[in-house]
Image (tube, rainbow, N blue to C red):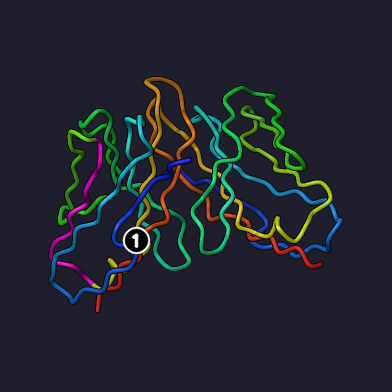
Amino acid sequence: ILNVEQSPQSLHVQEGDSTNFTCSFPSSNFYALHWYRWETAKSPEALFVMTLNGDEKKKGRISATLNTKEGYSYLYIKGSQPEDSATYLCALNAGNNRKLIWGLGTSLAVNP
Amino acid sequence: AAGVIQSPRHLIKEKRETATLKCYPIPRHDTVYWYQQGPGQDPQFLISFYEKMQSDKGSIPDRFSAQQFSDYHSELNMSSLELGDSALYFCASSSGTGGFPEQFFGPGTRLTVL
């Protein structure tokens, strides 16, 4: 059974803090890694899709890195804002298909 | 911009009843995915369709079936409903024939089985 693990499970930070969280996956089953942002009462929204070891992607204050050899990805948020409060999910393509294996997410709360 | 549409948004059924969930992908998206998310659980991939053919199958129970129609909308049919089927059901769509495209999610259908 393939497991995608995310840590921490939840995180509370103050507005302006920078933060990061981790997604771990089996490196032997890697094809692509996705990060999604999921706000309460909304649907998941794609942030990044990464396929290459060493990939770094950035969207505004949010960035992600990928290490496929050791099986992890970091998501960074610089200068957190209350509107960043959401659950951040990572998902793995573990085969040459589009089926995603999801982690449980990291729930981020940014206090004003 | 057009998004993925799911209907109904909420559905309440009794045990052993049937339910049909509908998904309308973003125009020109050729792939549809169905996910089930139980309370406090990660989304579980159920099934996907590409160009009206089943492309991948996940943890979809035998009591469930799905198809994609000629207009690319998809329906998830659930029979002999059980209490454990209560969950949020997401549909997502994507386009492109290769690679690992990002999936665009609908708002979900919350199914409650009593």
* Most foreground residue, B58 or B105: B105
Please give left or right for residue B65 compared with residue B99 in the image: left
Q: Going 40% across and 23% down the picture, which residue do you hit?
A: B96
* Most foreground residue, A59 or A109: A59
Please give left or right for residue B62 compared with residue B73 in the image: left
Q: How many marks?
A: 1
Q: Going 86% across and 56% down the picture, which residue do you hit?
A: A16
| Subunit bearing disc 1 | B
Residue A89 percent coordinates (x, y): 56, 49
* Most foreground residue, B96 or B81: B96
The three-letter amino acid code for the residue at tag 1 is: Thr
Residue B53 percent coordinates (x, y): 20, 31
Residue range in magenta is B72-82
Residue B74 percent coordinates (x, y): 24, 44
Q: Secondary structure at mark 1?
A: strand
Residue found at the far bottom of this picture: B114
Q: Is residue B88 above or below residue B5?
A: below
Residue A85 percent coordinates (x, y): 68, 60
Residue B109 lies in magenta, yes or no? no
Q: Which residue is mark 1?
A: B109
